[in-house]
Image (spheres, coloured by chain):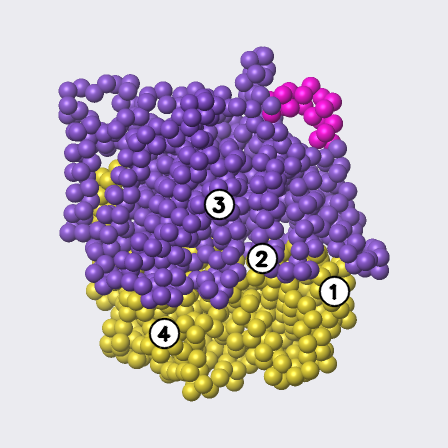
Chain colours: A purple, B yellow
Amino acid sequence: MEFLLVQALSGLASAASLFLVASGLSIIFGVTRIVNFAHGAFYMLGAYVAYTLTTRFAGPLGFWGAIVAAAIIVAILGALMEMVLLRRIYQAPELFQLLATFGVTLMVQDLVVVIWGPEDLLGPRAPGFTGAISLFGRMVPTYDLFMMTLGPVVLGILWLLFHKTRWGVLVRAATQDREMVAALGVNQKWLFTGVFALGVFLAALGGALQIPRTTVTHAMDLSIIVEVFVVVVIGGLGSVFGAFVAAIIVAELNAFGILILPQISLITVFLVMAVVLVVRPWGLFGKPESAPRAAAGLTIRPWRPFTQMERAGVALVVVAVAALPFFLGNYALTVGAEILIYVLFAASLHFMMTVGGLASFGHAAYFGLGAYGAAFLVKYMGAPMEAALIVGPLLGLAGAVLFGWFCVRLSGVYFAMLTLAFAQIAWSIAFQWVDVTGGDNGLLGIWPASWASRPAGFFWLALGIAVVGVAVLRMLVFSPFGYGLRAVRDSALRSEAIGLNRQRMQWAAFIVAGTFAGLAGALFAFLKGSVFPDYMAIPTSVDGLVMVLLGGVETVSGAVVGAVLYKALAIWLMSQTDLSKLVLGGVIVVIVLAFPKGVVGFIEDLRHRWPRKGNGAGAPVGATKAEAA
Amino acid sequence: MKKLVAASLAALLLAAGGARAQQGEIKVGEINSYSALPAFLDPYRKGMDLALKEVNDAGGIKGKKLVIISKDDGGKPADALTAANELVSRDGVVMIAGGFLSNVGLALADFAKQKQVMYLAAEPLTDALVWSKGNDYTFRLRTSNYMQAAMLAEEAAKLPAKRWATIAPNYEFGQSFVAVFKELLKKRKPDVEFVAEQWPPLNKIDAGPVLQAIDAANPEAILNATFAGDLVKLVREGNTRGIFKNRVVVSYLTGEPEYLDPLKTETPEGWIVTGYPWYGIKTAEHQAFLDAYQQLHKDYPRLGSIVGYSTVKSIAAALKATDDYSTAGLLKAMKNLKVSTPFGDVVYRAADHQSTMGAYIGTTSQKDGQGIMVNFQFKPGADYLPSEAEAAKLRPAN
């Protein structure tokens, strides 16, 4: 009995650290609707700056002063980022800000290694909280007790701030309806900057307070960012109290879960999120989102299929690409095949995001399922490549049927997070079920049939599948099903009034997208000759999102360009430098600022500003291509 | 957009032109998770640099300069394969080497088998690499999970403790290490029992609850296989809670400077660990390495430095042992190849392609606020490997 009480206390201490970071994210999320991927980066920066300061200034005053100072310094950095970067792109399509914060995250990961060196850094313990006291016959660290107290104190301060100050009232109003607040004459700019700085302050504080417990490393951000998102969503968007309760639930379930199933930590938060979202689609303390106002700028120019000329142009390009094996070496062709596979993967996600209006954060699940499907057939049934390529993606389809059924009940960010939860559950099964999936060591020896084993052969195979896949997705966009899907996306109420079943249509779109992702995954398995759980891990999902956003959400086939750009750049940088993340992140930030509608969206804008002269004789090839995209 | 494919591929092709083989050079490819795990791989690279300098200063490989092209894999098997492909298909390297994570090592080993190119695995510890998933093209330098588990089990069997608990990161490395340790300890001491186990996710240990759960089972001894940040959390939390008091802890890899140094004044007293006490090794070959390393880098070596240095020395030795740089020629040269390393001579066994590199075992202590290993002993790897005939049976027929 005493043991269980102490275990509960330990859980509370973990909950407090989780809550500190989550509260900041929740506030930012609630007001600006930015999926702030960089929140983990600020958490890490808080820890690094605090390390530098606490090792310089000794003594209790030095230590606690340094913790607060670190949080303030990082908050200023956060405010700067908001002013320089995010402020310029609030009008961009939904989720585009995610791309910007992702770029910043990549840069910070490399920058901290450049600045603070590669070694893990150990800061001092907190003066006054170095020991433990005996509770119920067991030792409980006083720092745990301090954290346990700090959680509710921060919650209280935030409550006072939001309920007793004018600024706080405005923030709450903006959380509910930002357009209305703006219409009433409130200067949104500074409100947003202030909110962002406060959120970053809390993240950095959370990071700084980790110093007495663990080392400061360049991987700290990844270890927390996703969990924090999950906590925010479980609690309900924008609800700080919800985040508090969710943090406690997650941490306690974890603390007791490991007593029964020691491997459970891998997946606790995601299981909790999946259950909560299925039962309560807006989180524990969230409110149903009011019907979103149609985002200005979306579909001002209706999409249209290719003209005959454009079709001929595309055919020419495909022929040109198909001729590449006569000019390029083996390495370039293998890279080309990889890019083509990602083109198909990104196109499938793009279909779901753009046409279906369903942004998925867990699309890699179906990519990975397709890869495992193909690998299982080869490994356990001795199937040839051709059969595995056809049947393997069906595992992706099956996953999409199952997960999609739950997901399409939700919308917006809740939908995105539920897809993430399912992807993580799928990942953890692949990771843990060692007997079947090989665990993290993966399944090896999934090599292509002899006719496709030469890079040129595989390149043609990948090209054929990618072209057919993208073409089919395009045809779907302009089919009655595609029109219906767009209607559902733009106005759920009106489309239901004319007899379109929203959930069923979106479920179908989900399944289509999942199947094509599975096809891409099956190809990928043969390209690499092996399958690993990280094919369906979060970074793969994020890569897909980045490709779609880079290309342009509001376009029909922008993902194709986005995938080519991003993957080619990523592979090339990786080969050229160890600081590839720094450069890649920088490039993404520049692209975000230069093309807030994505690369293809930008080119389309250009084309519509300057109508084509004659037959487009003077227009660059890229532009004529993209206008049709 | 397809134009972009063409353009980017053409750019890659152009870049390839610049990397054509120079006369009088032998190129070897190397892949590692430099950006993902700099704490281990920065010293590793420094070790490689030193060995490469020594090899080339001494006339290279029969007059030809040894060139090592290093690529980053970001800690992902798929990206490691892209890099391997670049090295083999474009840069025309005679063999590939490197790897830190076990899954990356296995992916590269499978690639080597498929493309029929030799792969020398530097650091990956998994036993599968040379045994259950071993292949003709893959050799491994580092003292494996099995060998280090056997060394630790030998020490553990000398202890009076009968009730054991285990804490290990939840992935293949931790799982297979714990399994081997259990098996070998039980063989030596049939009356031990394992009363609790905890499997925290890598880099995400929730140390308080994990340690409480271990404590509740009331073990006499604890086996730990967590490392890096997880280890620090575990040690700090355990010290504060008094979990390690009156308990023996056997801890894998903890004596490696990469993981021991960050502990500083938190370093626990008397843990039995494997590691690298560079400050106390008195052999001539290590002293020579230490002096040269400190002179070149103005820094002390970590275990990664030893691995990087010995990898390059192994490559050079293999290339010197043959004039036939085809894969078949290199594979032949690697079998029973003897290489001098700072840890003494090692031999790449012909039967299972595992080197006989040994490891240091000692106990932890503190000196001037730094963690060190004391009372350490060198354990030759050959003593802790199954015989070649037995090991050959562990490998798939291929």
Choose the circle earlier in sequence order: 4 or 1: 4
* Measured Cα–Cα span from mark 4 to mark 1: 43 Å
Q: Which residues are magenta?
A: A157-175
| Amino acid at the residue labelled 3 | Phe
User: Which residue, as the protein is rendered here, is positioned at the far front?
Assistant: A499
Name the residue at 25% across, 43% down. Answer: A467
Q: Are marks 4 and 2 on the same chain?
A: yes
Q: Chain of mark 2?
A: B
- Where is mark 2, residue-wise? B201
Q: Nearer the viewer, mark 3 or mark 4?
A: 3
Q: Which mark is residue B215?
A: 1
* Measured Cα–Cα span from mark 4 to mark 2: 30 Å
Q: Position of residue A549 (x, y in %)?
A: 40, 35
Does residue A171 show up magenta in the picture? yes
Q: Which mark is residue B135?
A: 4
Please state if A468 lies on the left or on the right of A235 as rendered.
left
